[in-house]
Image (spheres, rainbow, N blue to C red):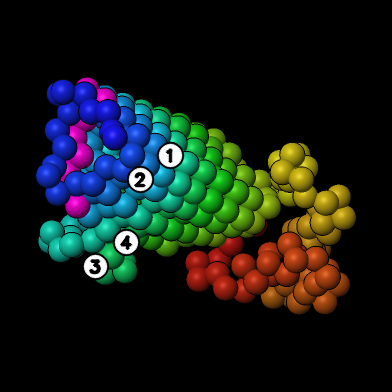
Amino acid sequence: MSARHPTAEISLEASLGDGVEVGPFAVVGTGVRVGAGCSIGAHAVLQGPAEIGARCRIGAFASIGSDPQDLKHRGEPTRLVVGEENTFREFVTVNRGTAGGGGVTTIGSRNFFMAYAHVAHDCRVGDDTIFANAATLAGHVTVEDGATVGAYSGVHQFCRVGRHAFIGGYTVVTQDALPFVKTVGNRAGSFGINTIGLERKGFAPEAIEALKRAYRLLRGSKLNIGQAVERIEAELGAFEECRYLAAFIRSSQRGVVK
């Protein structure tokens, strides 16, 4: 059974799993499916179509599954799909997708969105990410597993943030942010491998050292980026992390922050 505050407004066409708690004046709209064990804070608004996985925490005044902020959107049906054990703190906003962007915004599991963070239409967020206060994604952004987006940072539409990347506070990201790397600044630049963060996450010392060597090839040599990637693949290809780094750069459509 779910626990609903008497002032909450829940659509007859919404679905609540076992043990869902809905706080005062919260709204759960048509087409919203909420998994077991979730909690929905006071005045939060959930709009559908949207699927929220089990054991998610949605804070007061959050807006989850709202219409995309895209002038091309004309009310066509689009979706939001959210995994399990995510935390959306106060005033977080997450928009559904657009028809032109594939029709769906997706968020994985175990992500932590601090107050006022924003995920725009058609974004793809992986697992185990952290969005600090007011971190903002424009439309069509991909954030891969384990990344951190710092407070008041913005990521331009169609950019990617690589696995375990660290975006510093107040950073403006207009190209792809390299995996494993610290990216910081109003005109963003990269500032080396996020060694401490990777150590805390249990990366092997050998892998971290290999990533440092790869970064030196990218930034500390006279090689152009294509030559540096070839060297990384040839000399450090034994490390999965380095192979992934090289593949990330090769697949970039907007270029990477260096």
Residue farthest front in this picture: 1
Q: Name the residue under label 3.
A: 99
Q: Give the range drawn in magenta.
A: 23-31
Q: Which amino acid does label 4 sit on?
A: Val
Mark found first going from the N terminus, 3 or 4: 3
Mark found first going from the N terminus, 3 or 2: 2
> Is residue 55 located in the magenta-colored stretch of the structure?
no
Q: Is residue 227 visible?
A: yes
Q: Between marks 2 and 4, how big is the CA–CA gap?
A: 18 Å
Q: Between marks 3 and 4, how big is the CA–CA gap?
A: 8 Å
Q: Name the residue under label 2.
A: 35
Q: Mark 4 points at which residue?
A: 104
Q: Is mark 1 on a helix, strand or loop?
A: loop
Q: What residue type is labelled 1?
A: Arg
Q: What residue type is labelled 2?
A: Gly
The count of marks equals 4
Which SS type dominates the magenta stretch? loop
Q: What residue type is labelled 3?
A: Ala
128 in relation to 247, above or below: above
The front one of 198 and 33 is: 33
Mark found first going from the N terminus, 3 or 1: 1
Whole-percent x and y of residue 194?
A: 72, 45
Decide if residue 220 is on the left or right side of residue 23: right
What residue appears at the point 82 percent right and 77 percent down from the top-left corner? 234
Which class describes the residues within 10 Å of circle 1: few (<14), some (14-19), or many (20+)? many
What residue appears at the point 15 percent right and 63 percent down from the top-left corner? 76
Mark 1 in CB contact with mark 2 (< 8 angstroms):
yes
Whole-percent x and y of residue 61?
A: 27, 29
What residue appears at the point 38 percent right and 60 percent down from the top-left corner? 140
Q: Name the residue under label 1.
A: 55
Mark 3 vs mark 4, foreground winner is: 4
